[in-house]
């Protein structure tokens, strides 16, 4: 598994808030991808029907996931491919390393895959002295910089052109003042060599069509297609939730995914791969392996409150729509997935006590749910996870809230327990606020409320609350 | 079958209005009365339970939610000057009571009688021109902040704008990103004060750019947050609850 830094959310977020350059990049997600999605949605006549249909298909598929996974495996095998079910990232990694050893693989080209980030696959390959090169340009930049993807769709959204100049100068010897086209062509030259040399291609999966055993990849650079067709061996890794029943469903899902992700009507490439090269085909790999990975997903499946997290098609729309993501960025979330969907799945996939801050890293504004093409109710799941953190409904080891917070909640509960308690609380509150109040405002409060007054003042408790005004009669 | 008379309303004023912004409650009463509504106030009311529920303290939230159900069961129209509290009852009680079929059913029934103020005025009473306030010489410019729960949990995006536009002497200057959260989010603003503060700064930038003299919203907690930031930064834009604007005009 990839390194888990979810406990560092607060410090990582503070770093990002203090980085003006990154703040500008993040702001642009609103005017860019988020608006692009909205424009496409408005221009697509039956957008809401598509969303509802996709949600129904996903719900049905996830409810019957055993059936569809079996169907998919059978059809991949019928097409001449091999299928491996991996319980966790270790098992998936071992399968790939064994295969690489058997095939005497020395270099691997990789298409974009978030699952491979879960597995930390590149590091494991490097340990076996196998060079793995990311071929999605953003992923390539992130790999050169020794980082992890910042965003599901745009992994290097946090980098500026000058960052890329520096990176390419150091790693590829490119002129430090090179323009965008020069930089792109340097990357193309570098990657072209890698494509030609590679013994194995590893890609993710946007979808796997169960009825045909077809792998579907959506890219804008064609790197996915090259990774699936140039090397002798192609390994596709997919989270088990990526399954869809039929090819007909692709019409719905491709429309939703691409429009929600980048605001395009269609991406430059949509690649469909069914098995290895057949006798009548001219190109394609000699072997095709599909690794279907659980890695904690069955915990989501088992919990009816969280199951719909498995409907996610990884379009990134919830990240772009999220005002918190647009402040704290991707790395702050401390694990592979960021934004609202990351705040839901990371605690489950990495275990709740590791990531108890994440479900709280949301103002619960609901912009994610509004943006999600599958209408995944992310705020509801964040709320549920918060109750898991404080009360540990299903597992006592999850109880993690601070004693001060628990005390404050109890005190609050008593104070609003009834009208007489509320009157008493009003009185106590007015006494307590005395040293802080000036002209009806509290401008500086002690911890834990000091954070509030750092950015805003607070109103003083009224000495004549509404209930007493009502008793006296409201003037017309 | 006779239609229930929308002229009888029980006001749930919300705990924040009661304790911090009682004038918003008074304005709500006056606005409703001007539209011929007979308003009751059950003075046993306290809080809907949302602060605890949102923070994950569902056990602490439940008795308050049950209390709410006991108080308002059988009431035809419960009106609240808050989209967030209305969402709590209408949407989130179902989540809170997910494992108790009896309470779940009661919550659904009571929830179907709960309305946020602008929803009630426009959707139930059919109000278009809302205010009886005097036309002032120069129109006041207001901008509108869309409260998150009102928009996304209740789906009410047009009602408040309709009421603002129908108010004589008031010009609506839309700000950019009016639908983006101000960063309040309850305890979020304390737990993650700096993230929340950064979101607030962006909201304030858009409010200023709109050139409005007042920022209107349907939820006092958003306005408490935005207003606290405006005050801290010495920006002369007035935070104003929709009820106050409808009651007194924006001057």
Image (cartoon, coloured by chain):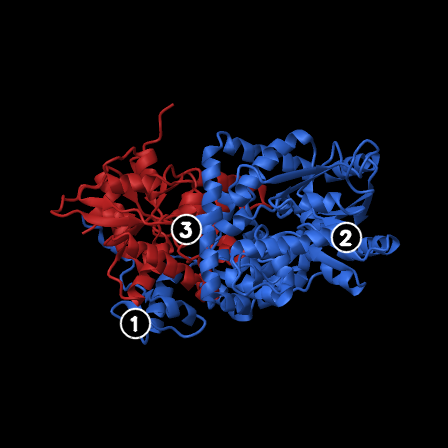
Chain colours: A blue, B red
Mark 1 residue element: strand
Mark sitting on residue A437: 1
- Residue A321: % across, % down: 48, 49
Mark 2 residue element: loop
Mark 3, Cα crowd under 10 Å, few <14 / some 14-19 / many 20+, is many
Farthest-out residue, top: B1
In the image, residue A468 above or below residue B5: below
- Residue A329: % across, % down: 52, 59
- In front of the other: A82 or A288: A288
The quarter of the picture where residue A359 lies is bottom right
Residue A337 can be seen, yes or no: no
The quarter of the picture where residue A83 lies is top right
Q: Which residue is mark 2?
A: A198
In the image, residue A170 above or below residue B125: below
In the image, residue B88 above or below residue A143: above
**Label 1 – label 2 distance at C-alpha:** 70 Å
Mark nearer the N terminus (1 vs 2)? 2
Q: Residue at horizontal 56%, vertical 69%?
A: A402
- In front of the other: A185 or B187: A185
**Label 1 – label 3 distance at C-alpha:** 31 Å
Q: Which of the chains bears the disc numbered 1?
A: A
Q: Which residue is mark 3?
A: B180
- In front of the other: B217 or A75: A75
């Amino acid at each position: 598994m990839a390194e888990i830094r979810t406990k560092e959310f607060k410090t990582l977020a503070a770093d990002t808030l203090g980085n003006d350059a990154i703040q500008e990049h993040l702001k642009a997600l609103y005017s860019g991808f988020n608006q692009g999605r909205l424009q496409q949605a408005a221009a697509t006549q039956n957008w809401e029907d598509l969303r509802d249909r996709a949600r129904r298909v996903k719900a049905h598929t996830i409810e019957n996931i055993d059936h569809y996974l079996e169907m998919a495996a059978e059809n991949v095998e019928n097409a001449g491919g091999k299928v491996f079910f991996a319980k966790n990232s270790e098992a998936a990694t071992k399968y790939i390393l064994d295969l690489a050893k058997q095939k005497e693989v020395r270099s691997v080209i990789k298409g974009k895959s978030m699952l491979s980030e879960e597995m930390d696959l590149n590091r494991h390959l490097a340990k076996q002295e196998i060079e793995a090169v990311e071929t999605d340009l953003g992923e390539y930049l992130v790999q050169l910089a020794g980082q992890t993807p910042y965003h599901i769709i745009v992994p290097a959204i946090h980098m500026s052109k000058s960052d890329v100049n520096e990176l390419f100068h150091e790693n590829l010897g490119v002129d430090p003042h090179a323009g965008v086209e020069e930089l792109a062509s340097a990357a193309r030259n570098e990657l072209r060599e890698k494509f030609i040399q590679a013994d194995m291609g590893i890609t993710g999966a946007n979808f796997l069509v169960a009825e045909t055993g077809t792998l579907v990849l959506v890219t804008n650079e064609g790197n996915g297609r090259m990774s699936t067709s140039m090397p002798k061996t192609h390994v596709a890794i997919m989270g088990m939730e990526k399954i869809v029943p039929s090819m007909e469903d692709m019409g719905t899902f491709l429309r939703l995914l691409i429009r929600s992700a980048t605001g395009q009507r269609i991406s430059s490439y949509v690649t469909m791969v069914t098995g290895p090269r057949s006798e009548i085909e001219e190109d394609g790999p000699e072997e095709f392996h599909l690794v279907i990975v659980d890695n904690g997903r069955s915990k989501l499946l088992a919990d009816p409150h969280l199951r719909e997290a498995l409907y996610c098609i990884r379009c990134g729309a919830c990240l772009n729509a999220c005002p918190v993501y647009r402040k704290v960025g991707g790395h702050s979330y401390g694990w592979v997935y960021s934004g609202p969907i990351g705040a839901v799945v990371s605690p489950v996939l990495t275990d709740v006590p590791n990531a108890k801050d994440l479900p709280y890293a949301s103002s619960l504004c609901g912009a994610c749910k509004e943006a999600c093409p599958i209408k995944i109710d992310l705020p509801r799941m964040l709320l549920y996870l918060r109750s898991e953190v404080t009360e540990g409904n299903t597992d006592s080891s999850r109880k993690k809230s601070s004693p001060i917070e628990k005390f404050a909640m109890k005190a609050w509960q008593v104070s609003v327990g009834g009208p007489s308690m509320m009157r008493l609380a009003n009185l106590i509150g007015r006494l307590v606020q005395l040293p802080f109040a000036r002209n009806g405002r509290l401008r500086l409060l002690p911890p834990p409320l000091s954070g509030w007054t750092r950015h805003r003042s607070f109103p003083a408790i009224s000495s004549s609350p509404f209930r007493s005004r009502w008793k006296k009669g409201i003037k017309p | 079958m006779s239609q229930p008379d929308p002229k009888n309303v029980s006001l749930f004023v919300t705990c924040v209005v009661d304790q911090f912004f009682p004038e918003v409650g008074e304005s709500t009463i006056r606005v409703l009365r001007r539209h011929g509504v007979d308003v009751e106030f059950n003075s046993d009311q306290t809080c809907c339970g949302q602060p605890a529920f949102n923070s994950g303290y569902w056990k602490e939230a439940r008795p308050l939610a049950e209390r709410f159900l006991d108080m308002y069961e059988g009431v035809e129209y419960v009106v609240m000057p808050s989209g967030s509290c209305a969402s709590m009852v209408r949407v989130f009680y179902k989540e809170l009571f997910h494992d108790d079929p009896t309470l779940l059913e009661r919550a659904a029934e009571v929830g179907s009688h709960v309305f946020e103020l602008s929803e009630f005025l426009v959707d139930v009473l059919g109000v278009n021109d809302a205010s009886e306030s005097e036309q002032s010489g120069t129109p006041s410019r207001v901008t509108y902040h869309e409260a998150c729960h009102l928009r996304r949990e209740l789906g009410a995006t047009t009602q408040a704008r309709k009421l603002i536009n129908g108010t004589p002497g008031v010009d609506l200057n839309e700000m950019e990103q009016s639908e983006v959260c101000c960063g309040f989010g309850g305890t979020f603003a304390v737990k993650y004060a700096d993230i929340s503060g950064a979101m607030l700064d962006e909201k304030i930038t858009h409010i200023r750019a709109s050139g409005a003299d007042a920022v209107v919203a349907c939820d006092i907690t958003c306005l408490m947050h935005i207003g606290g930031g405006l005050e801290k930064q010495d920006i002369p834009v007035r935070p104003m609850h929709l009820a106050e604007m409808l009651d007194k005009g924006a001057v």
